[in-house]
Image: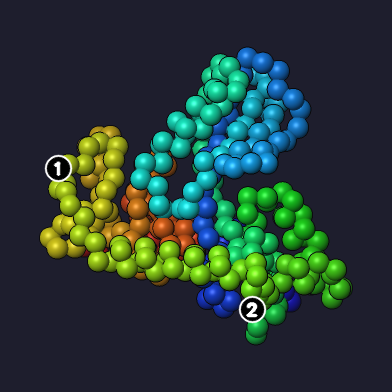
Amino acid sequence: RAGVLATHYPFYDSPGFYYARMEPSRSYVLGLRIDEPFPDGTFINAEGPTHSWRSQPTGDGELVLVTGMEHRAGESVDTREHYRDLEAYVRSIYPVRSVDYRWSAQDYITNDGVPYIGPLAEGHENIYIATGFRKWGMTNGTAAATILTDMIRGRASPWAEVYAPDRFKPAASARRFLVHNIEVAEKYIGGVISRPAGDLADVPPGEGRVLMIEGQKAGVFRDREGRVHAVNPTCTHMGCVAAWNSAEETWDCPCHGSRFDADGKVIHGPAVKDLKPRGG
């Protein structure tokens, strides 16, 4: 028998130390109507910062989807700015009639930029993973299906070595591995020792902040009706302090990308346990 962890991020991540070998990255998407014909197809720019474009026919006419403004999960001060900046970028190129949709998404980037597809780790040869697609899910998802089908059925795959999860290529991986884990250590230590200023009364409706309340950190969100939602902002994955995502109204971990709703319920791994209520 064989099992495949195709869960975006492997929820069983200790074998293989995937939390140390992948960086969480967020991007933003706008669905727009424009006043000029848009070429059929999918496009991405060659220079940075990266933006991609594609047309999407709908019952109400053509919709143009534009993505960009990527950043490491949990490290942006006001994520709403990314939507505004993305819209300004589009308006600098096309006359925009309306912005009908907006959302953000998250993916993981491996140390060398190539997905991990294959056995989870030594001693877990009957458990397979497919992760770290670097926002190229349609292409890499198809590759993963092909490779894993061959492996499970006992056939040799010509691509298995390229995507092997246990690979390590110093020239391609070492620098990113060190940078990622130094950043994680900085965010962990900084979050633990920080003593954020402010008072509960300073949090306006629709906003969230980490505050010190009775000597303990509290992640506080005040909804638009004035109700306060308070959680322990310590991520249940490995103990980093989550940051408030103002655009999505979630608590996002800056270390490994776990996300929780305003009441602390897990909505994205690697965490599998909810944040505790304030005082819990």
- Left of 112 or right of it: where is 153? right
Place of residue 116 in the rendered image (x, y in percent of width and height, measured from the top left): 67, 66
Residue where numbered disc 1 is placed: 201
Q: Quadrant of residue 195?
A: bottom left
Badge 1 element: helix
Q: Quadrant of residue 47?
A: top right
* Numbered tag placed on residue 95 in the rendering: none
Looking at the image, residue 200 lies above or below residue 53 = below
Q: Are marks 2 and 1 in contact (CB under 8 Å)?
A: no
Label 2 vs 1, first from the N-terminus: 2
- Left of 79 or right of it: where is 163? right
Place of residue 139 in the rendered image (x, y in percent of width and height, measured from the top left): 74, 51
Query: What residue is drawn where x is 16% and y is 48%?
Result: 198
Residue where numbered disc 2 is placed: 121
Looking at the image, residue 196 lies above or below residue 235 = above
**How many labels, in total?**
2
Point out the residue furthest to the left here. Answer: 214
Question: 229 or 235: which is nearer to us?
Answer: 235
Looking at the image, residue 57 lies above or below residue 119 = above
Q: Amino acid at mark 2?
A: Ala
Query: What residue is drawn where x is 67% and y is 73%?
Result: 169
Query: What residue is drawn where x is 48% and y is 53%?
Result: 72
- Left of 11 or right of it: where is 145? right
Distance (Cα) linking label 2 and label 1: 49 Å
